[in-house]
Image (cartoon, rainbow, N blue to C red):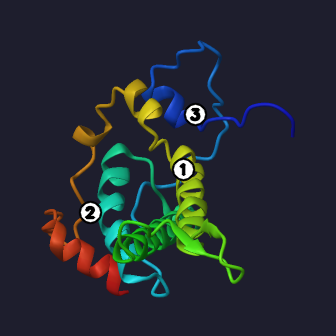
Amino acid sequence: MVGRRMKPSQLKALEGNPGGRPLNEAEPAPEVEIPDCPGHLSPEAMAEWARIVRELYNLGLISQLDRAMLAAYCQAYGRWVEAEQKITEAGAMGAIVNSPNGYPMMSPWLIIANKALDQMHKFAVEFGLSPSARSRVASKVGDQLPLFPASGSTGAPDTFEDFLRRATLQ
């Protein structure tokens, strides 16, 4: 498909539908819920999962369908953090190494960091997480949803820590 990628109608509505075009009334609207965290994620990726799912849930922008794409975003984040740590550990010249021939070249860790950052940006745009997308969102959705879903029959919300423990350990 040629041209700009279409934005989900829910994201357009949160932005106030600035283009004024009709929203797709037939667009699927999956239930807003936090998917289970995949067990194969790195520790840094799992920490990012725990951080971001709360924000996406409060905006009503997450469902079970988003699990793989969110996992990919978080794993790219984990790779970026690891690569940046390796560059920092290498000291002042961490971004530059000598090739086998002795010539200076970009560190492989810098290449990994740059690629992961590019991947993170692409996934962030999909979820409406870029600073420009966030500046256009004026949402009351978070006020209408419980802070996090309840697990018991009482209907009372769990603490976020209890909910997160269930969501990430299942």
- Looking at marks 1 and 2 on the same chain, the residue that comes earlier in the sequence is marked by 1
Q: Is residue 17 above or below residue 114?
A: above
At x 67%, y 37%, the residue is 26
Tag in front: 2 or 3: 3
Q: Which residue is mark 3?
A: 9
Q: Is residue 115 left or right of residue 16?
A: right
Which of discs 1 and 2 lies nearer the camera? The answer is 1
Callout 2 secondary element = loop
Q: Residues within 10 Å of mark 2 (few under 14, many from 20)?
A: some
Q: Nearer the viewer, residue 93 or 30?
A: 93
In the image, what residue occupies the spot 52% across and 63% down?
A: 73
Say which residue label 2 marks: 149
Q: Is residue 152 visible?
A: no
Q: Quadrant of the C terminus?
A: bottom left
Q: Identify the mark at residue 121; answer none if there is no mark.
A: 1
Q: Residue at x 36, y 82 (%)?
A: 43
Q: Earlier in the sequence, mark 3 or mark 1?
A: 3
Residue 97 x, y percent position in the rendering: 55, 73
* Residue type at tag 2: Pro
Q: Which mark is residue 66?
A: none
Mark-to-mark CA distance, 1 and 2: 29 Å
Q: CA distance from mark 2 to mark 3?
A: 24 Å
Q: Which numbered disc, 2 or 3, marks the residue that appears first in the sequence?
A: 3
